[in-house]
Amino acid sequence: MSLIRELQQLVQTDSPISGRVISVSGINVVVATASGQMEVGANGDLSVGDLVVVEAGLARKKQRGGDDTVYFV
């Protein structure tokens, strides 16, 4: 796939891309995703290991829906 086509898919995608931060460099982060790694801007304070969502070229922390209920049997 050409770099131009890959860039078009990243920009035009309707669904957000999720991944894990593997490197932080100033205001940019490298995110490992299912389709490879990508360098994007950081929206907020991110650190290595954070789960993020990439939208419009910015990575932001993935919001959890609250505490999960754990049942012991």
Image (cartoon, rainbow, N blue to C red):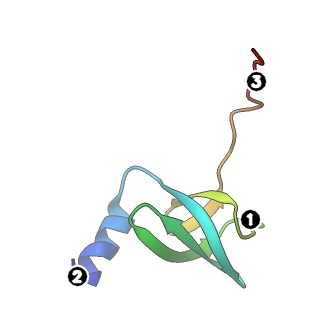
Helix, strand, or loop for circle 2?
Answer: loop
Amino acid at dot 2: Ser
Q: Which mark is residue 2?
A: 2
Graded by Cα atoms within 10 Å as few (under 14), some (14 to 19) or many (20 or more), the crowding at tag 1 reads few
Q: Residue at x 48, y 75 (%)?
A: 38
Which residue lies at the image location 34% right of the left edge and 75% below the top edge?
Answer: 7
State the separation of the CA atoms marked 3 and 2.
46 Å
Within-10-Å neighbours for mark 2: few <14, some 14–19, many 20+: few
Q: Position of residue 46 (x, y in %)?
A: 74, 67
CA distance for labels 2 and 1? 31 Å
Residue 58 coordinates in the image, percent (x, y): 57, 67
Please tell me which residue lies in front, 33 or 12.
33
Q: Which residue is mark 3?
A: 70
Residue under label 1: 44
Question: Marks 1/3: CA distance?
Answer: 30 Å
User: Which secondary structure, mark 3?
Assistant: loop
> What type is the residue that disc 1 sits on?
Gly
Q: Nearer the viewer, mark 3 or mark 2?
A: 3
